Amino acid sequence: MLFMKIAVIPDGAMMIIHLVTKNGHEYLSSTNLSEEKLRKKDPYDDSFCDYDAPPFSMKDHERLTGNKYASCETPSGLRGRMSMFDFIIRDADAAIIMGPRPKGYKHMYNHLNELILFSCVGCYNHYKLLIQLIKQKDIPILELAYPDNREKIICMIDRINDFLQGLHTGKYKNEVINDDNLNCDMRPYKKKISLNDLEKIINEFN
């Protein structure tokens, strides 16, 4: 069986992390925050801080590795985030990427629970750049739309399990699985009407 190192984007989505570890793969964490550590940590306790984990444990040269992904004109916050994800970009054997929340999304759970389960995009520029760099590696990638109801969550879990189990057997090669028909912004593609069709619609009301 093949055991792979899996990049999860956005980082820290507990629902995906659990499935990665449950299926015998290794989750690559930018902060060395394992599923076990996530379960032990009190999300309401802001006083706890692990100074042995990134970014606190990063040495000077490690803080500069993000500079190779972006020019000096880009914000330092973006380059700093890329420094934390350098080894993930370098070591990932496969990736699971979830799109951002849809517009007009109605929360299924409270904000904290959704943040723990699905994480968040955070810096959108970092999110887009990280996806681009991961895709340049030519590794198996599963792209998922953000689930907005219970049925879609169940379907998402089944698809992630199928993907992770398929990695064990070599079912998925260097391909991007995009069954949700997501566009480059990781949102479901919506067909736009042509200018001629728009003119016909307008003329019907005149």
Image (tube, helix red, strand yellow):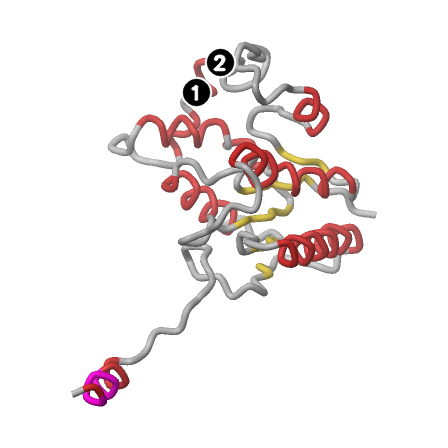
Kind of residue indicated by mark 1 = Arg
Asked if the magenta segment contains residue 203, the reply would be yes
- Spatial separation of the CA atoms under disc 1 and disc 2: 6 Å
Q: Is residue 130 above or below residue 31?
A: below
Q: Is residue 9 left or right of residue 2?
A: left
Q: Which mark is residue 59?
A: 2
Q: In what element is the residue under mark 1? A: helix
Most foreground residue, 24 or 158:
158
In percent of width and height, residue 96 lies at 60, 48
- Residue in the image at 46% along x and 55% along y: 186
Q: Could you tell me residue 164's position as x and y percent?
A: 73, 50
Q: Is residue 6 magenta?
A: no
* Residue 104 in the figure: left or right of residue 139: left
Instruction: Say few, some or many: other residues with alpha carbon within 10 Å of mark 1 (under 14 / 14 to 19 / 20 or more).
Output: some
Q: Which residue is mark 1?
A: 63
Q: Amino acid at mark 2?
A: Lys
Q: Which residues are magenta?
A: 199-204
Secondary element at image label 2: loop
In the picture as drawn, the residue positioned furthest to the right comes out as: 1
x and y percentages locating residue 62 in the rendered image: 47, 20
| Residue 61, picture quadrant | top left
